[in-house]
Image (spheres, helix red, strand yellow):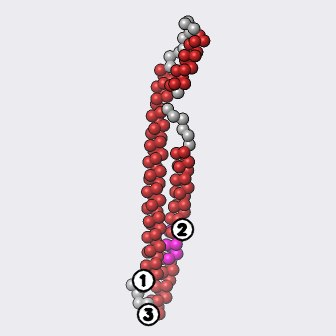
């Protein structure tokens, strides 16, 4: 802005001549400077949130993997009962079904969050690529 404004001011003063006067523009430049600082803060926060989202995605993917591992472990476990006892075997199967269903629901929720944050990260990348006016 400073270069463009300086050139425009010189051209205008040539037109106006020696008697011409352009209003004081200090407030304009102060506002421009403040806008540049705010833009720098915005860019930093954008970069910070992109890093935080990537970190969160990593944690969610790790959590999803741990859910899978726990579900596999649960399927093999006797849950403290005797699998050779007919009544216990039935209880084990029922309890594993209830717990497995809950884990499946939790995994679905986790996978939806992963998908959602991938979309958010994509939008942040697009914001980063948007050509913001230089200050």
Magenta span: chief secondary structure: helix
- Element type at mark 1: loop
Q: Is residue 81 above or below residue 117?
A: below
Q: Which residue lies under the disc numbered 1?
A: 77
Question: Decide: marks 2, 1 in contact (CB < 8 A)?
Answer: no
Q: Is residue 120 above or below residue 4?
A: below
Residue lying furthest top in this view? 19
Q: Residues within 10 Å of mark 1 (few under 14, many from 20)?
A: few
Cα–Cα gap, marks 1 and 3: 13 Å
Q: Secondary structure at mark 2?
A: helix
- Magenta residues? 100-106
Q: Which residue is mark 2?
A: 108
Label at residue 59: none
- Mark 1 touches mark 3? (CB < 8 Å): no
In this rendering, the answer to whether 103 lies above or below 89 is above
Front-most of 87 and 28? 28
At x 54%, y 68%, the residue is 108
Residue shown at 52%/21% (left/top)?
6
Q: Quadrant of residue 70?
A: bottom left
Q: Choose the circle earlier in sequence order: 1 or 3.
A: 1
Disc 3 is placed on an element classified as loop
Q: Which mark is residue 84?
A: 3
* Camera-side mark, 2 or 3: 2
Question: Which quarter of the figure has residue 76?
Answer: bottom left
x, y percentage for residue 60? 46, 63
| Percent of width and height locating residue 50 | 47, 51
Q: Is 117 contained in the magenta span?
A: no
Alpha-carbon span between mark 2 and mark 3: 33 Å
- Residue drawn at x 45%, y 61% is 58
Q: Nearer the viewer, residue 107 or 33?
A: 33
Asked if marks 2 and 3 touch (Cβ < 8 Å), the reply is: no
Q: Residues within 10 Å of mark 3 (few under 14, many from 20)?
A: few
């Amino acid at each position: 802005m400073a270069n463009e404004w300086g050139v425009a001011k010189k051209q205008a003063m040539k037109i106006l001549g020696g008697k011409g006067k352009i209003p004081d523009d200090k407030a304009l430049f102060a506002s421009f400077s403040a806008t540049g600082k705010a833009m720098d803060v915005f860019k930093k926060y954008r970069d910070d949130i992109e890093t935080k989202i990537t970190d969160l995605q990593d944690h969610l993917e790790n959590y999803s993997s741990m859910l899978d591992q726990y579900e596999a472990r649960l399927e093999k476990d006797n849950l403290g009962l005797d699998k050779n006892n007919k009544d216990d075997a039935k209880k084990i199967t029922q309890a594993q079904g209830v717990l497995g269903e809950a884990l499946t629901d939790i995994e679905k929720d986790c996978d939806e969050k992963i998908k959602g944050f991938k979309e958010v990260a994509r939008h942040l990348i697009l914001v980063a690529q948007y050509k913001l006016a230089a200050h």
